[in-house]
């Protein structure tokens, strides 16, 4: 099937099934182009909860589709590639959380959205990279356990020094591989460019940045900045929106290896098959649904 026919088939199937397609900023360009909504997991989970369509095709990784299902359990949520997981989310289990709670009974648990539903259910509140600082500041307890991304936790710790924050040792394989030497190399290749990085990067990378933020915050920063050149320290998919919104500006990926292999699994062909066969349906264990819903809704309340 040629590209145009494939796009038309997806469009017709979407109408026929009363579905919406949402895509994370890390998806391949073709998928972002055809999606009804593109953004980070915070924005997409809100969109999924607010829309009326019965079927959500979530082009992202497993925990994102799972979060959409938690917030809209009455809807059918489809993940076009069932193996699109997140190694960071798999670095923590519900048993780990139980052990932490036993060891630190007077601490509140703030859990990054990159986590399984069973871990969310045992947490006090969820956060994303857009609102992690705000969430930690807003909960009344000054003693916090931050899960599972250590680098995002370190970034929060620096910005909320008044709180006692215990970190977990998880990391994103795509952001973690970037080191200080890579930054110095990129800066010397593009001396006039501003460096914008994601807080999942190592501390030594974050320290050298002109701006640190989530994908949405990076896009907003570059779009409103008067600067003309930017080095981008996050997954390559974000270049799609950056270039679309800022055709007159130059964007350089901090390192060619900033590619999430899981995010890149979904293609227009798997998207078509997801709609056609209504697969792969994401469900959440009844025993964890309520707890995960409570923690996610608390995040949405904080904003
Ligand atoms: O919050 C998200 O969607 C993630 C995982 C990254 C980002 O900054 O968009």
Image (cartoon, rainbow, N blue to C red):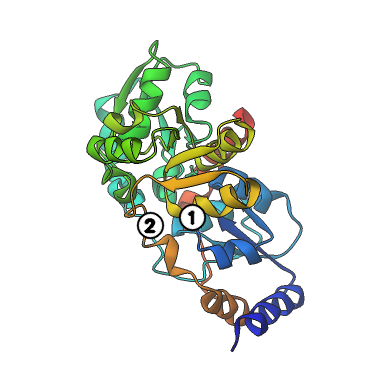
Q: Residue 271: x, y in percent?
A: 56, 74
Viewer-proximal residue among 115 and 214: 214
**Crowd band around label 2 with a 10 angstrom C-alpha radius: few (<14), some (14–19), many (20+):** some
Q: Quadrant of the C terminus?
A: top right
- Residue ID for mark 1: 237
Residue 278 falls left or right of residue 129: right
Q: Is residue 108 above or below residue 63?
A: above
Q: How many marks?
A: 2
Residue 274 found in image quarter: bottom right
Task: Mark 1 and mark 2 in contact? Answer it, CB < 8 Å.
Answer: yes
Residue 262, quarter of the rendered image: bottom left
Residue furthest to the bottom: 1
- Crowding near the residue tagged with mark 1, few <14, some 14–19, many ≥20 C-alpha atoms within 10 Å: many
Quarter of the N terminus within the rendering: bottom right
Eye-nearest disc, 1 or 2: 1
Note whether residue 251 is visible.
Answer: yes
Q: In this figure, which residue is indicated by the disc labeled 2?
A: 260
Residue in view at x 45 percent, y 35 percent? 193
- Under 8 Å from ligand 1: the CB of mark 1? no
Residue 261 percent across, percent down from the top left: 36, 62
- State the image coordinates of residue 138 (x, y, percent, origin top left): 53, 20
Q: What residue is rendered at 33% in x and 46% in y?
A: 172
C-alpha gap between disc 1 and disc 2: 9 Å
Q: Say if 198 sits above or below 62 in the image.
A: above
Secondary element under disc 1, as helix, strand or loop, is helix
Q: In this rendering, is residue 232 above or below 167?
A: below
At horizontal 32% and vertical 36% (from top left) the residue drawn is 188
Which badge, 1 or 2, comes first in the chain's sequence?
A: 1
Q: Residue at x 51, y 51 (%)?
A: 239
Which is nearer the eye, 186 or 271?
186
**Residue 244, position in %: x, y?**
63, 52
């Amino acid at each position: 099937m040629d590209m145009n026919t494939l796009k038309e088939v997806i469009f017709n199937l979407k109408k026929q099934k009363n579905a919406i397609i949402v895509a994370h900023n890390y998806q391949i360009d073709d998928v972002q182009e055809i999606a009804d909504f593109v953004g980070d997991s915070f924005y997409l989970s809100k969109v999924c909860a607010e829309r009326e369509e019965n079927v959500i095709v979530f082009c992202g990784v497993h925990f994102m589709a799972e979060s959409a299902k938690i917030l809209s359990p009455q809807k059918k949520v489809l993940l076009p590639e069932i193996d699109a997981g997140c190694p960071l989310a798999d670095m923590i289990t519900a048993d780990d959380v139980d052990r932490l709670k036993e060891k630190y009974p007077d601490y509140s648990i703030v859990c990054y959205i990159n986590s399984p539903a069973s871990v969310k259910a045992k947490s006090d509140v969820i956060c994303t990279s857009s609102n992690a600082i705000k969430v930690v500041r807003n909960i009344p307890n000054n003693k916090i356990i931050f899960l599972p991304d250590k680098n995002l936790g370190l970034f929060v710790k620096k910005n909320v020094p008044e709180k006692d924050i215990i970190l977990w040792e998880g990391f994103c394989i795509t952001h973690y591989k970037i080191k200080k030497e890579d930054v110095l190399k990129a800066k010397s290749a593009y001396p006039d460019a501003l460096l914008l990085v994601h807080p999942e990067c190592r501390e030594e990378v974050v320290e050298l940045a002109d701006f640190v933020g989530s994908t949405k915050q990076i896009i907003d920063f570059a779009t409103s900045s008067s600067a003309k050149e930017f080095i981008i320290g996050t997954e390559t998919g974000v270049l799609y929106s950056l270039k679309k919104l800022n055709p007159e500006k130059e964007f350089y990926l901090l390192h060619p290896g900033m590619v999430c292999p899981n995010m890149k699994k979904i293609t227009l062909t798997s998207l078509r098959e997801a709609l056609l066969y209504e697969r792969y349906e994401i469900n959440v264990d009844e025993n964890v649904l309520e707890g995960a819903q409570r923690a996610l809704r608390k995040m949405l309340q904080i904003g």
